[in-house]
Amino acid sequence: MLFSITVYFGLVISLIGIFYLAIGLGITFFLHGLMIGHIRSNGVKLTEHQFPAVHRKVRELCAQMDIRQVPDVFVLQSDGILNAFASRFFGRNFIVLYSNLFEMADTEEDELTYVIAHELAHIKRNHMTKSLLLLPAQWMPFLGKAYSRACEYTCDRMAAAYTGNVPAAVSALTILAIGRTMYAKVNVAEYIAESRKETGFFFWFSYALSTHPPLPKRIEQMELMQAQPQLFGYASPAFEREPFAS
């Protein structure tokens, strides 16, 4: 944060800095607006009459998490990609669920609830706004990516705490790794153990450039949270208190 403030201040006090700052923010704003426009024009918006059960679950989670402005939730065709993300534009929050992930609503309801809670955690922690404020830090090698990974760990923990369902969290993350068809057959302990054996420059470099922690590490953190909740600020696996979040 200090680095970003210093960069912003340095840019603002110079005329050329103001120009470049305006251009950079303008391009970012325009491209983000195009993305939101595509989502709003093509996505299927959840309402009381469009997938009402999931829409109701979103509202319940917002009330539980003390999120006053319920975000618009859209389902977008994804060509097989399993993903979801939260965004913000002109003061409005959005959650996008890719279609292949949203299909969990039929058979993996708890896992979908966890995914939604994870994205709502990004909104609760104002991660989108913070990322904009920290934009200059993204120019520093690895710094912005490290912050993004920390945010993902935070939202994993918050989603598990608010849903109170760590097994669903593990299943949801496993689905992201291998898909909905085979996830139940995955030996999770073996998956984590084999991941620990991976070393080398390119393994490290890939991690350093990633916005998300490796899925085995995220799963391992969820299992640790279940086994030793006191490490995360809880007295028991009931998760009575929200943990400190980035």
Image (spheres, rainbow, N blue to C red):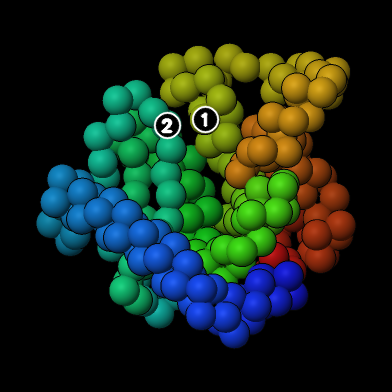
Mark 1 Cα shell of 10 Å, populated few (<14), some (14-19), many (≥20): some
Seen from the viewer's position, the closer of residues 62 and 110 is 62
Instruction: Examine the rendered structure and indicate whether residue 209 appears above or below residue 16.
Output: above
Instruction: Examine the rendered structure and indicate whether residue 135 appears above or below residue 178.
Output: below
Label count reads 2
Task: Say which quadrant the N terminus sits in.
Answer: bottom right
Instruction: Examine the rendered structure and indicate whether residue 92 appears above or below residue 166.
Output: below
Label 1 residue SS: helix
Q: Position of residue 133 (x, y in %)?
A: 56, 72
Question: Given the current orientation, which residue lies at the most extreme bottom position?
Answer: 13
Seen from the viewer's position, the closer of residues 169 and 119 is 119
Q: Find disc 1 in the rendering and name its residue.
A: 176
Q: Find disc 2 in the rendering and name its residue.
A: 82
Q: Residue at x 15, y 45 (%)?
A: 42
Task: Say which quadrant the C terminus sits in.
Answer: bottom right
Q: Residue at x 44, y 72 (%)?
A: 19
Label 2 residue SS: loop
Quadrant of res 22: bottom left
Task: State which tag comes first along the sequence, 1 or 2.
Answer: 2
Q: Say if residue 57 shows up in the picture.
A: no
Amino acid residing under circle 2? Leu
Instruction: Examine the rendered structure and indicate whether residue 31 appears above or below residue 179.
Output: below
Q: Judge left or right: residue 48 versus residue 118.
A: left
Q: Residue at x 59, y 76 (%)?
A: 11
Quadrant of res 207: top right
Amino acid residing under circle 1? Leu
Asked if the residue at tag 2 contacts the one at tag 1, i.e. Cβ–Cβ closer than 8 Å, the answer is: yes
Q: Between marks 1 and 2, how big is the CA–CA gap?
A: 6 Å
Mark 2 Cα shell of 10 Å, populated few (<14), some (14-19), many (≥20): some
Q: Position of residue 141 (x, y in %)?
A: 72, 47
